[in-house]
Image (spheres, helix red, strand yellow):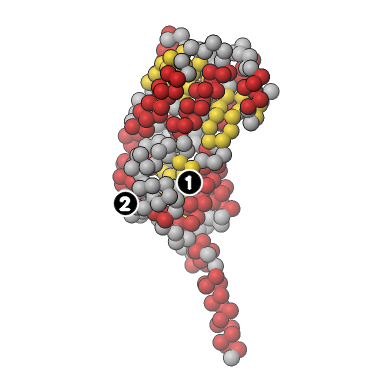
Amino acid sequence: MIRTVFVFFCLLPAVFLPAGSAAQQTGKIFRIGFLDNSTASGNAVRLEAFRQEMSKLGWIEGKNIAIEYRFAEQKRERLPELAADLVHLKVDLIVASGGPTPLAAKGATSTIPIVMTTSPDPVGEGLVASLARPGGNVTGLSGLAPELNTKRLEVLKDAVLKLARVGLLRNPRAGIISDSQTKELRAAAQALKLKLEEIETELDIKGLESAFQTAKQKQVGAIMTTPGNRFFAERKRIVELAGKNRLPASYPDKEFVDEGGLMSYGADSTDLYRRAAVYVDKILKGAKPGDLPVQQATKFEFVINLKAAKQIGLTIPPRVLERADRVIK
């Protein structure tokens, strides 16, 4: 009888511990692939948010998970090769950042689970069957980029009096995703009686400087960038050029304002990366990606930097300041 009770209590951990804890007990290390179309330094702040959330959930690099990082270094054409490399390594799961990255991951495998950190239109891009029932091997977060682009343009017009022309920096290599967002912005600009000057921008020093020269030549009164990791990675240089050229700018991520940018309106991207970690946790514990609904962004923030406004001689109307979630003075 005593022996039976002893065996029973010894077996309790195996019965009741979650899969992550079980992995720690058995010494199994799950391999996670992280696929990104930008750079390690440019996306560091989001990656740190992801790792911190994974740690809170009990997943520690070197202990029960190993992360294989693959960065395309602003060269989209490398994504299929990098995705195939992760598949060859037989990773247990792939985390794919936004833009074309989830598509590259899905093109490389139909069996390895894929968690996207953000996608503007996962159904339209063919990543999932529906938000509620993704099916297949892809799930994750959607960033609502088209709707937020329109809102960003509205805010820019309200903030810059007598604004007539807006320069849109867009990535010529972003393909159908960028085209879809630009189409939405064209319609919004027309409704707001603004002229949208589309400026194709190569994301290196020379390309960015050339884009701002073009913006000045077209006599735009303000600029915007389309969302995406590639612009995000170059945010510091973009903010510096906007200030140098005394151009008001509206950005998709608050991190641009953290670098000294004028204002931002958009989803909290670091929050999306934290929530992606929750999906990873569930899948590593046995959930199927096709059964996990794609969630849309829920945290949005409008930030204004009055220091940046003063530097370019811009006075932002009080009614716009009142709408801001955060004002940097």
Q: CA distance from mark 1 to mark 2?
A: 21 Å
The residue to which callout 1 is attached is 295
Q: Amino acid at mark 1?
A: Gln
Q: Residue at x 55, y 70 (%)?
A: 16
Q: Residue at x 52, y 57 (%)?
A: 63
Quadrant of the snapshot with the C terminus? top right
Q: Secondary structure at mark 2?
A: loop
Vertical side of 297 occupied by 292: above or below? below
153 lies left or right of 137: right
The residue to which callout 2 is attached is 110
Q: Residue furthest front?
A: 191
Q: Residue at x 51, y 61 (%)?
A: 20
- Asked which quadrant contains residue 324, the reply is top right
- Relative depth, front residue between 111 and 72: 111
Vertical side of 198 occupied by 83: above or below? below
Residue 62 visible somewhere in the drawing: no
Q: Residue furthest right?
A: 329
Instruction: Please say if the residues under marks 1 and 2 sit with CB atoms less than 8 Å apart.
Output: no
Quadrant of the snapshot with the N terminus? bottom right
- Relative depth, front residue between 78 and 101: 101
Q: Position of residue 30 (x, y in %)?
A: 45, 57
Q: Position of residue 91 (x, y in %)?
A: 39, 53
Q: Secondary structure at mark 1?
A: strand
